Amino acid sequence: MSVSAPARLDARTLLGPRHWARVEGWGMAVSALGHLVRPRDIDELRALFAFARETGTPVTLRGGGRSYGDAAIGQGCLILDLTAMNRILSWDPETGIVDAEPGVTIEQLWKRIVPDGWWPAVVSGTMFTTMGGCAAMNIHGKNNYRVGPFGDQVLEFDLLLPNGELLTCDRERHADLFHAAIGGFGMLGCFTRIRLRTKKVHSGNLAIEAFPTTSIPHMIEEFEDRVPDADYLVGWIDCIAGGRSSGRGIVHRADYLREGVDPVPRESLVLRAQELPSKVFGLPKSLLWWPLGLFINDTGMRAVNAAKFHAGRLLPVGAVYPQAHAAFAFLLDYVPNWKWAYKPGGLIQYQSFIPRANAARTFETLLRMSRKAGLPAYLGVFKKHRPDPFLLTHAVDGYSLALDYRVTAGNREALWRLCHRMDEVVLAAGGRFYFAKDLTLRSRTAARFLPRENLDTFVALKHRCDPGNVLQTDLSRRLFASHFADTGQQDP
Ligand SMILES: Cc1cc2nc3c(=O)[nH]c(=O)nc-3n(C[C@H](O)[C@H](O)[C@H](O)COP(=O)(O)OP(=O)(O)OC[C@H]3O[C@@H](n4cnc5c(N)ncnc54)[C@H](O)[C@@H]3O)c2cc1C
């Protein structure tokens, strides 16, 4: 381990007089009161870590705050918002390799590289996530089955430990830490630089095909047929329709255009061609969340889902149309702040990952359980995954279904109970969960879905890198309080 530099900045100055803030999980169903600070560089980060150690204040790391639940909030913590560390340090348009500070967003990244004919190889469904947040959760895209998660694109990173040491990690140097900090939900240290490879593209457009499916087994069949050669696959599922319509949906396939297919790539690669439209149905996008709110109830969503499914059935079979990368990747960003339609209670997302052989049966059961409980999911998104080498990976050789549920004061308790019952179904199927989305897991469940050996190794690394348990979030306290408890060891 390298020698730590002394903290030379006064953290109290960085904190300032008005630093208390209420910070929400993205789904608005949970919040925490903490000291919010935006460090601008490693020196400020070091000073804040030193302050935290001296005063016994726990630290929560936060990127774009796009985790649905409590992964980036910490009650009473020093919440370090890393979005001011947002410089792209280097970009090589010959190799497609970028060095970025942790607060650089996916939006910043694609806007920088797309004119040179590159695209981030793995993106989330929103472009407002940061490099640090994406690495800490090891996010997956709609191409997870093909290229693996975000971590598979990372070549190396610098990690600042709570004791001020800065470690450079890759697949050889501190390889254990490399595979644990990626997906380590901000528990081992703070990423301060991430080196990433990106994907060469020969057009600003993808070739898109959409087709309806009548059930989850049918959707899986269609995925499996296309997995060998499709670049992206994603399914939408109508989670409200029951009976013979249960599990019906629409699959979207997207493929990169091979070199030479787009006759004038420089035209489709300009930023203008990638920007999302500023108006939808003639309305300014910023206002759209409000009318959307009128549909966020069982009746409204039943009608919206039916209309969407039947519109999908009208699509001509085999029709392929072009769509810009950003438009395909960030569909959810078309309506800024669409989550406000879920106010006042917010929403949670329940995403489970199930091995292929059990996927259809398990997801059908989850949908039935939700409907029976009178708590249907309003949105269901289906993806295919593959295993990866990261210690706490959420991926399996199989499928995931992400279910969005509205939270209200009246349904909250019943919804949490439903999630706990669904947890048992997922565990029985050999499934996994994803901390970026979670708000309802219990610690005993978390300890059961992670392989024992992996959890033990992670806990040992936590004790080595952060013996004072400085790094905490409300998620880590909810799920791993006893595992991460301060060991009383001194910093190495
Ligand atoms: C609309 C929407 C769509 C989404 N689509 C997808 C998707 O398709 N695939 C997917 O996998 N996820 C998806 N997500 C989830 C999202 O990608 C993850 O929650 C991601 O981690 C958010 O990044 P962030 O920068 O907002 O991080 P935050 O939510 O702020 O933080 C996430 C975690 O990273 C830690 N962290 C943040 N910065 C650092 C750092 N510098 N060093 C160490 N730890 C750090 C935090 O402590 C926290 O545990 C989606 C979320 C939303 C809201």
Image (tube, rainbow, N blue to C red):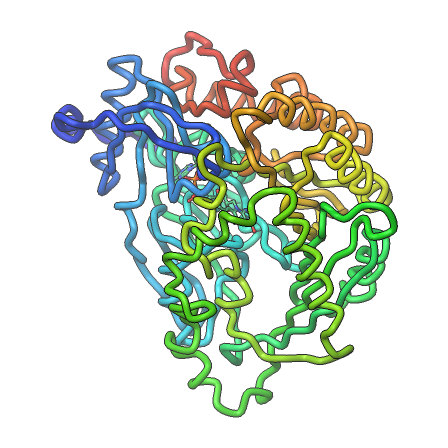
Q: Position of residue 337 (x, y in %)?
A: 41, 50
Name the residue rendered at 67%, 22% in the picture.
417
Q: Position of residue 246 (x, y in %)?
A: 81, 48
Image quarter in which the C terminus is found: top left
* 182 shown above or below 467: below
> Which residue occupies the foreground of this view, 207 or 137?
207
Q: Quadrant of residue 483?
A: top right
> Which residue occupies the foreground of this view, 450 or 340?
340
Residue lying furthest top:
488
> Which residue occupies the foreground of this view, 18 or 129?
18
Name the residue rendered at 45%, 29% in the picture.
188
Q: Quadrant of residue 96?
A: bottom left
Name the residue rendered at 45%, 49% in the picture.
156
Q: How many marks?
A: 0
Decide if residue 310 is on the left or right side of residue 78.
right
* 249 shown above or below 434: below
Q: Position of residue 286 (x, y in %)?
A: 37, 57
* 283 shown above or below 219: below
* 17 shown above or below 350: above
